Every structure is written in C-alpha cells, then in structure tokens.
C-alpha cells in the first residue's frame, strides 16, 4: 500500500470538498432560497464555472480509465472518444444548451411535456434517469479503480470509499458546489497531467517515448499508433462512438443541467472556448499513458483496468503521483456528482413535484434531492461490483438517448405528434436492446455494427415517415405558445 500517496490524495479531496461545500452552504444560509437554488445554482453560474463544469461533467471514468483500457486494444484510435466529446460540446454550446436555458427548464423531460404532453415526459423521465444512473455505476467503478491502485484494496472496497467522497462533492450545496469545485480541480488536473507526461518519459528507455513506438511497430501492430486505427476500428468505434456521444449527451440531463444553471445564453456560447479544448486535450494525455502501460511488462501483467494507474503510482515521484491521482479522482468525482444530481433532479421535479407535491417549496425539493443522491450512490456501489467494460457499457447506455435527441429536434423545428414521438422512442429502444441481448446482429451478419448506428437508423426512419404521414402541430419554435413563454419569462425581469 502506498500510504503516503493515499493520505495525500484523501486529505486533498476532503479539505477541498468540505471547505468549498461548507463555504457555499454558509453563504446560502444567509439569504432566502432562490428558485432552482440547489439543482441550478439559482441560474447564476458565471462563464468560467459553466465552461469547466461542462468539460468535467463528461470527463470522468470513461475519459480517463476507459481510454486507458481501450488504448490497450485499439491503440491511439481511442482518442475518438475524446474527439466525439469536443464535437458534442460545440453542439451543446451553440444549440441544445441554449434551447434549455432560453426555455427556463429545470429538467430535459420538461421539454418533452411542452412538445408532446405529460405521458411522453414521464416515459423519457424514467428512461433518462435510468441511463444517467447507469453512467453513475461506471463512475463508481472508476473511483474504485483509482483507490485500488493506491491501496491494493479490491475495486469494490475502493468504490465504497469513493462513493462517500462523491456524495460529499454535491450534497452540501448542489450545483454551486459542483461548479466551484470543478474550477479548482481543473487547474490541478492539467498541471498534474503535463508534469506526469514529462516525468513518465524520463522513466522509459532513452528518456523518451521512442521505446513505446518501437514496441508496437516491432510487434506488427503499427495501427495502434494511428488515430484512425484500421478501417474496421474507424467504422465500428470512431464513427459509432461519435454518433452515440453527440446524439445522446447532446440532450442528456447531466450535460444540460450546467447550461440551465448559466447566467445567460451568452455565458454558454462563451464557455465553448474553454470547455472544448479543456476536454479534448485530456484524451491525448490519456492515450499516451494507456499505450505506454502496455509496453512495460510488470504493468502489462496487471491487465487493462489497473495497469496505467499502477504505473503512474510506481513510476512518478510520490508528490506528482499524489497530485495526478487526486486530480483524476476529482474529475471522476465531478462526473459522479453530476450523474447523481441529474437523476435526483429528474425524480424530484418530474415525479415528486409534478405528480405528488405540486406545492413543494425549494427547501422541500433540496431535501428530496439530497436523499435521492444518497440512495442512488448506495445502489451504485453494489452495481459497480460487476465491473463491466467501461466504454462498451457507456456506448450501450448512450444509445438509449439517441431517439430522445431527434424527437426533441423534430418537435422544436418540424412537427409535434405525440403518437409519432412515443412510437419512435419505443421502436429505437427495442432495437437497442435487441442488438445487445439477442442473436439478431449475428443472424444479419452485422455483429460489428455499433448500437448507435442501429438506434439512429430506426429513429430517423420511424420519426421521419411517421411525421410525414401523421397530423400534428407545427414546430414549437414557430408556435404562438413559444413566444408567449418567452414573454412570460421576460416579464419578471422588467418589473
């Protein structure tokens, strides 16, 4: 056990989490509750906090440990998971994030209510909460892997300790706490990454990464050094991942919630110039570290899940290993926080308040969210014990939200038909499940086709044909109720 590194990492996390959380909680106690205070930080987050929260919300286990793991098999092509998220952040900051902020939403399912009615909202609420919870279980696994690399504990035991830290990351002050913690942790993370990449090279033969390149070329695996990999890797992974990420996370509650919390639409647009580079560059460092771990026999013997993190602990100076692992853990805790806050917000707003307590106060809702966050984290600890392959599970989960993205786009810009919307969602979800849990792909000789391709094809086919054939209202952005909603939201500001 690396006791010194473990103590340093835990002290860093506890001090910063409790310090920022208690500071924000004390500030909040001195003034009345604002609308959306816990879930949306009073819709008042400044640009730097929004930008870094967007970047770190999707920079968790999949980006760090998932890329380490995937680089083991696909090589440099694993960088496409990061490239896909850069494209995603561009789209969010220039379109979907602006839409949810403009409409004054608290949850994504609310927009389904505006477009198609309560039934569609409830269907999407349950599905989206389940998908985000699935991502939460993977984040819990990631926390367990980081702590396991420092302690020698099992990943399951590490997940328990990490989940407790994750609860503290969000439970004191909600969205404000996540945002301000992210601002501090992003600085520490990039400082640690840059220094680690330099120090790691000094520990390799020749004091550089030439030995890594030689390992793959001499073994006939030159494709591992190309970001395009092989044609099969590019088609099945690179493009499939890009479709899954952009058309699912582009409308997911966990990424829309920071946008809903922004001061204004202008804040979101400006956030792009920090969020996209911050998120994208991380993938470069992760791929380099993942490729390197496989070339060192003593770490390669540990397997893809823990080889890279164990190499960092053993190869870096203790102070730098502590700094880097603390920042990795903080990044995963950030995503853990958002993947617990997002389904808790959906449950509280779309189920608790919408169906059972319409007159619930902000204090009531904050209390329910805190309880839900704790319950979700406890369940995630148990589910994380099954240790599924991280990116494979992520891409399956992402495919569930692909039809939600297109149903929202159809309703905002083209036509609103509840029957077509529900049919499209259900058809795509059935196809996604069949593609993963039946022999259908093998029977069609399409086993290498990713789930995202299938759900996208079904969504567009059913949605377009259905809207062409069915009657329905025009796109919401062209409707009188949209203009009335904007006027209603603008009225309090002018009073």
Image (cartoon, rainbow, N blue to C red):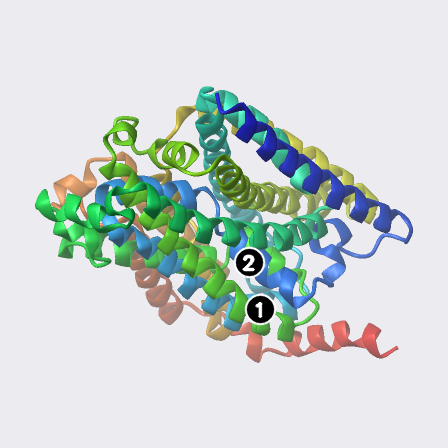
Residue at the (60%, 47%) spot, across then down: 342
Residue at the (26%, 50%) spot, across then down: 209
Q: How far apart are the two marked residues, 1 and 2, measured between alpha carbons?
A: 8 Å
Residue 454 visible in image: yes
Percent coordinates x, y for residue 123 in the rendering: 52, 47
Mark number displayed over residue 356: none
Mark 2 burial class by Cα count in 10 Å: few <14, some 14-19, many 20+:
many
Residue at the (24%, 42%) spot, across then down: 205
Please name the residue that numbered disc 2 is placed on: 54
Total numbered labels: 2
Q: Nearer the viewer, residue 187 or 167?
A: 187
Q: Label 2's element?
A: helix
Residue 377, compared with residue 187, is above or below; it is above
Q: Nearer the viewer, residue 154 or 460?
A: 154
Q: Nearer the viewer, residue 97 or 328?
A: 328
**Residue 160: quadrant of the picture:** top right
Mark 1 burial class by Cα count in 10 Å: few <14, some 14-19, many 20+:
many
Tell me, yes or no, whether the two marked residues, 1 and 2, touch with CB atoms within 8 Å: yes
Q: Nearer the viewer, residue 409 or 258?
A: 258
Q: Is residue 159 left or right of residue 72?
A: right
Quarter of the figure with the C terminus: bottom right
Please name the residue that numbered disc 1 is placed on: 271
Percent coordinates x, y for residue 28 in the rendering: 84, 50
Percent coordinates x, y for residue 335 in the rendering: 54, 45
Q: Is residue 64 left or right of residue 78?
A: right
Percent coordinates x, y for residue 235 in the rendering: 20, 56
Residue 287, compared with residue 436, is above or below; it is below
Q: Is residue 382 left or right of residue 77?
A: right
Q: Earlier in the sequence, mark 1 or mark 2?
A: 2
Residue at the (65%, 67%) spot, across then down: 47
């Amino acid at each position: 056990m690396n006791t010194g590194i473990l103590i340093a990492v835990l002290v860093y996390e506890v001090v910063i989490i409790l310090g920022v959380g208690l500071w924000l909680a004390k500030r909040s106690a001195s003034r009345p509750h604002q609308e959306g205070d816990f879930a949306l930080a009073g819709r008042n987050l400044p640009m730097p906090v929004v930008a870094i929260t967007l970047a770190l919300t999707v920079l968790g286990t999949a980006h760090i440990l998932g890329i380490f793991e995937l680089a083991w098999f696909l090589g440099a092509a694993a960088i496409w998971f990061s490239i896909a998220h850069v494209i995603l952040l561009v789209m969010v900051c220039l379109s979907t994030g602006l839409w949810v902020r403009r409409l004054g939403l608290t949850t994504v399912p609310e927009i389904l209510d505006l477009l198609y009615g309560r039934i569609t909202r409830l269907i999407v609420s349950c599905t989206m909460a389940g998908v985000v919870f699935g991502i939460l279980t993977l984040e819990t696994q990631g926390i367990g892997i980081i702590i396991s690399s420092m302690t020698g504990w099992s990943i399951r035991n590490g997940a328990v300790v990490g989940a407790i830290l994750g609860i503290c990351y969000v439970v004191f002050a909600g969205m404000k706490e996540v945002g301000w913690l992210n601002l501090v942790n992003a600085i520490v993370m990039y400082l640690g990454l840059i220094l680690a990449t330099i120090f790691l090279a000094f520990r390799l033969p020749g004091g550089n990464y030439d030995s890594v390149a030689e390992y793959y070329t001499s073994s006939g695996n030159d494709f591992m050094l190309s970001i395009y990999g092989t044609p099969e890797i590019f088609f099945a992974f690179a493009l499939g991942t890009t479709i899954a990420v952009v058309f699912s996370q582009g409308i997911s509650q966990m990424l829309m919630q920071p946008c809903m919390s922004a001061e204004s639409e202008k804040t979101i647009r400006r956030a792009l110039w920090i969020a996209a580079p911050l998120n994208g560059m991380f993938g470069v460092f992760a791929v380099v570290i993942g490729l390197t771990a496989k070339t060192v026999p003593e770490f390669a013997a540990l397997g893809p899940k823990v080889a890279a993190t164990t190499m960092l602990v053993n190869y870096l100076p203790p102070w730098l290993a502590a700094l880097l692992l603390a920042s990795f853990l903080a990044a995963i805790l950030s995503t853990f926080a958002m993947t617990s806050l997002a389904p808790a917000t959906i449950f509280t707003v779309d189920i608790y308040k919408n169906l059972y307590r319409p007159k619930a106060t902000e204090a009531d809702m904050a209390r329910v969210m805190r309880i839900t966050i704790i319950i979700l984290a406890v369940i995630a600890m148990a589910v994380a014990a099954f240790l599924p392959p991280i990116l494979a599970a992520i891409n399956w989960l992402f495919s569930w939200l692909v039809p939600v993205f297109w149903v929202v786009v159809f309703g905002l810009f083209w036509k609103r038909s509840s029957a077509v919307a529900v049919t499209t969602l259900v058809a795509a979800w059935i196809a996604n499940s069949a593609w993963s849990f039946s022999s259908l792909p093998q029977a069609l000789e399409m086993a290498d086709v990713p789930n995202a391709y299938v759900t996208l094809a079904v969504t567009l086919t059913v949605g377009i044909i259905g809207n062409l054939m069915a009657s329905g209202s025009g796109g919401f952005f062209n409707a009188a109720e949209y203009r009335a909603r904007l006027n209603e939201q603008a009225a309090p500001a002018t009073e």
